[in-house]
């Protein structure tokens, strides 16, 4: 659907100075609403001052550097970047990157659940597998990656690892001194979220990502907003995961979702989640 056919839905008055940790833009092997400049402009028009560009294909660090102030990038450790590649993480960090995502379309969990409804946005885009956990133990090649993440105080995001894999990873990350930990769209059904995982991750001071695209794709029982009732709201952050051209753009999706967030937690908490809590996870 052409962009001009989407209705613009106003965001609440309090929605200013916000941060989005998860925005997709072209160029991409998946269809996107716009390129980096267009995507950042669309988010700024809705009250976002800080935006993180994400690409399943590799690094957005260089792209973010030319997209304007308040735009950050990171690196996704799929097979296209070499999987557990500490040199790639080092380069991304030294160029100003702030995020390191674990494998997404390369994760065994993603590939096992590729036919699930919530992953239909990735149909037609496949990469080779990248292994992270064997028999409940983090594979040895990932420890060097964790050292680089810790040395540069980067955000380590779970990508498309399952809840159980994420627990293994984040326990090890803490032992390496990684302080900024976030679970991507934990409620998506293929990731097998559980109360047991939630208990461990809360003890590890892990942030959970509230997102809009997961709530558009999943059923009511797997909406990310349900986390506001089961996990400390002080540990919730925002990553919209918008940008896919076959689903609503920010101008249409952001306003209604923010109002649902406000209805669940109240304006002051909603504002904190969307502003200071999310920005403080991203930036030193």
Image (cartoon, rainbow, N blue to C red):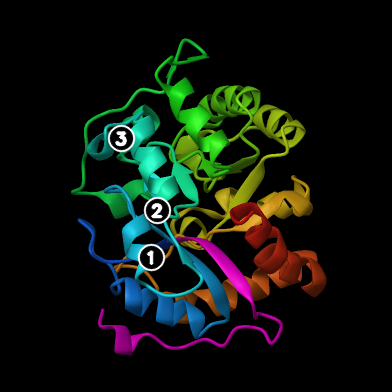
Label 1 vs 3, first from the N-terminus: 1
Above or below 228: residue 257: below
Q: Which residue is mark 1?
A: 65
Whether residue 113 is visible to the viewer of this picture, yes or no, is no
Closest to the observer: 96 or 106?
96
Closest to the observer: 113 or 144?
144
Q: Which residue is mark 3?
A: 106
Tell me whether circle 2 and circle 3 mark residues in contact (CB < 8 Å).
no
SS class of the residue under badge 3? loop
How would you rate the neighbour count of disc 2 (Cα within 10 Å): few for under 14, some for 14-19, many for 20 or more?
some
Above or below 126: residue 216: below
Q: Which residue is mark 2?
A: 95
| Residues shaded magenta | 1-22
Tell me whether circle 2 and circle 1 mark residues in contact (CB < 8 Å).
yes
Tell me whether circle 1 and circle 3 mark residues in contact (CB < 8 Å).
no
Label 2 vs 1, first from the N-terminus: 1
Q: Position of residue 132 (x, y in %)?
A: 41, 23
Real-space Cα distance between discs 2 and 1? 8 Å
Real-space Cα distance between discs 1 and 3? 26 Å
Q: Nearer the viewer, mark 1 or mark 3?
A: 1
Real-space Cα distance between discs 2 and 3? 24 Å
């Amino acid at each position: 659907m052409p962009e001009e056919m989407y209705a613009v839905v106003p965001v609440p008055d309090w929605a200013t100075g916000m941060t989005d940790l998860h925005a997709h833009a072209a160029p991409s092997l998946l269809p996107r609403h716009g390129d980096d400049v267009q995507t950042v402009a669309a988010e700024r028009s809705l009250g976002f001052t800080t935006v993180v560009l994400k690409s399943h294909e590799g690094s957005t660090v260089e792209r973010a550097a030319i997209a304007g102030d308040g735009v950050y990038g990171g690196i996704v450790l799929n097979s296209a970047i070499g999987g557990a590649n500490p040199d790639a993480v080092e380069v991304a960090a030294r160029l100003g990157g702030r995020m390191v995502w674990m494998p997404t379309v390369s994760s065994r969990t993603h590939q096992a659940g590729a036919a699930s409804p919530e992953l239909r946005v990735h149909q037609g885009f496949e990469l080779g597998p990248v292994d992270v956990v064997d028999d409940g133990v983090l594979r040895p090649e990932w420890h060097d990656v964790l050292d680089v993440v810790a040395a540069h105080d980067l955000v380590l995001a779970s990508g498309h690892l399952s809840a159980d894999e994420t627990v293994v990873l984040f326990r090890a990350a803490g032992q390496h001194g990684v302080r900024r930990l976030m679970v991507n769209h934990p409620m998506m059904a293929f990731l097998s979220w559980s109360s047991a995982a939630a208990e461990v991750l809360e003890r590890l001071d892990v942030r959970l990502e509230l997102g809009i695209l997961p709530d558009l794709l999943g059923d009511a029982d797997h909406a990310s907003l349900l986390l506001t009732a089961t996990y400390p709201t002080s540990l919730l952050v925002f990553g919209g995961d918008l940008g896919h051209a076959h689903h609503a753009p920010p101008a249409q999706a952001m306003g209604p979702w923010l109002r649902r967030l406000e209805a669940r937690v109240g304006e002051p908490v909603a504002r904190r989640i969307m502003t200071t809590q999310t920005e403080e996870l991203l930036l030193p």
